[in-house]
Image: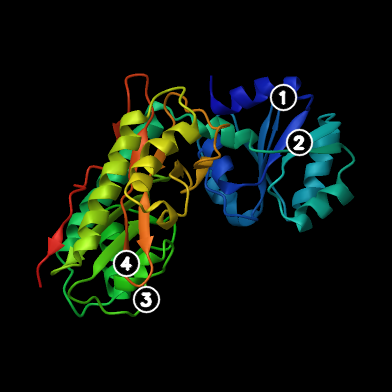
């Protein structure tokens, strides 16, 4: 059964005649066609799948090989949606509740069918990966691991965080990545105590720890990997922190199994950090889902994630961290597949502390 067929089968159970999809990642997931945000939508009824876009996509849609999907070319996207729904006798139309208020206002004005919002309808389908998706995620993770090893050869005192991020970006794209899934984090010295610091013009100095957090799309899917390394001689406390974080990371991975709840999984690593006296310095969730986007379901899991329960073939990150203001921080992140046979780690770059000699 195809993904579109799975959605079509669900529509009657949801009391829907059709569902309109505007999120580009969801359209790609269902059809394999790349449509930029705002450039149209996919309409799925119990018997039809129709991509509606404009003449900029006419040739690409004509060449698109998918027996399930037909195309309509128009500049009047939502006027066409109303006309199609009338012709197909659609009286109840579902839509993604992530649409902008502007788009909701348009739908509310032009649609004669009743419109009903749904939360994460397609995203819940995306949570469980098939073998092709897992293969793509493995390729993305392999490239990330290789990119990290490359970047270590470029590090020296005096190079800036931004220069390192730019060199990584060039290398990743030269070796098969289509683009970054989020702005690369290169955070050195005191900046590494900021979990979401962006690459700046700060120069790498002897004694710095450097946190590198990055993800790149390969064949439409993204890995998300973090490694922390040191340059020259570093503060002994940071060495200790590194070992604590790395132990916590491994503890979480060791507890990954089908059926475990997110709060229990988080606790496996958070307790290690708390026992070492750094519970106040770990100020974010333990991880999140990845796939076609860098943040997929589960959006996050942490101490309050009792409603998250792992299922077979979902992929999530494990990324504990400790951040001490003025001193520095350490985060180590792996991507892990949940399987009935236990965890499978996609990111293969070594996790022991690397010290780059100046």
Residue 200: give its label: 3
* Residue denoted by label 2: 94
Is label 1 in contact with label 2 (beta carbons under 8 Å)? yes
Q: What element carries label 4?
A: strand
**Above or below, 139 relative to 314:** below
* Residue denoted by label 4: 328
User: Is residue 48 in sight in this rendering?
Assistant: yes
Q: How far apart are marks 4 and 2 (CA)?
A: 48 Å
Q: How far apart are marks 3 and 2 (CA)?
A: 44 Å
- Which quadrant holds residue 204? bottom left
Q: Distance between the residues labelled 1 and 2?
A: 9 Å
Which quarter shows the C terminus? bottom left
- Which quadrant holds residue 19? top right
Q: How far apart are marks 1 and 3 (CA)?
A: 48 Å
**Above or below, 271 relative to 35:** above
Q: What element carries label 2?
A: strand
Identify which residue is drawn at 23% across, 61% down.
237
Is label 4 in contact with label 2 (beta carbons under 8 Å)? no
Q: How far apart are marks 3 and 4 (CA)?
A: 16 Å
Give left or right: position of 279 versus 226.
right
Identify which residue is drawn at 37% across, 61% down.
323
* Residue denoted by label 1: 11
């Amino acid at each position: 059964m195809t993904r579109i067929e799975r959605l079509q089968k669900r529509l009657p159970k949801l009391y829907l005649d059709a569902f309109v999809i505007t999120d580009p990642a969801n359209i790609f997931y269902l059809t394999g066609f790349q449509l930029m945000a705002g450039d149209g939508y996919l309409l799925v009824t119990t018997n039809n799948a129709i991509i509606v876009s404009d003449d900029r996509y006419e040739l690409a849609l004509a060449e698109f090989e998918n027996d399930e999907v037909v195309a309509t070319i128009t500049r009047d996207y939502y006027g066409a949606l109303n006309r199609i729904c009338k012709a197909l006798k659609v009286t109840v139309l579902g839509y993604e509740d992530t649409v902008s208020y502007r788009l909701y206002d348009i739908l509310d004005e032009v649609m004669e069918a009743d419109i009903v919002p749904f939360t994460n309808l397609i995203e819940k389908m995306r949570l469980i990966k098939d073998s092709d998706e897992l293969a793509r995620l493995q390729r993305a993770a392999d490239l990330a691991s290789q990119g990290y090893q490359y970047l270590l050869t470029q590090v020296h005192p005096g190079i800036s965080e931004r220069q390192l991020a730019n060199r990584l970006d060039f290398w990743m794209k030269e070796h098969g990545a289509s683009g970054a899934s989020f702005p690369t984090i290169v955070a050195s010295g005191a900046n590494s105590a900021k979990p979401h610091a962006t690459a700046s013009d700060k120069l790498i100095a002897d004694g710095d720890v450097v946190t590198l957090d990055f993800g790149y799309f390969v064949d439409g899917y993204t890995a998300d990997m973090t490694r922390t390394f040191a340059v020259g001689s570093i503060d002994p406390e940071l060495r200790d922190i590194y070992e604590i974080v790395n132990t916590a990371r491994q503890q979480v991975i060791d507890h990954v199994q089908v059926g475990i709840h997110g709060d229990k999984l988080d606790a496996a690593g958070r307790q290690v950090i708390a026992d070492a006296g750094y519970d106040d310095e770990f100020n974010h969730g333990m991880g999140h889902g990845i796939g076609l986007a860098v943040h997929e379901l589960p959006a996050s899991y942490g101490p309050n994630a009792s409603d998250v329960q792992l299922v077979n073939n979902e992929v999530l990150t494990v990324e504990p961290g400790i951040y001490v203001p003025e001193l520095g921080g350490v985060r180590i992140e792996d991507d892990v597949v949940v399987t009935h046979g236990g965890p499978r780690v996609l990111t293969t770059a070594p996790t022991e502390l690397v010290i780059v000699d100046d």
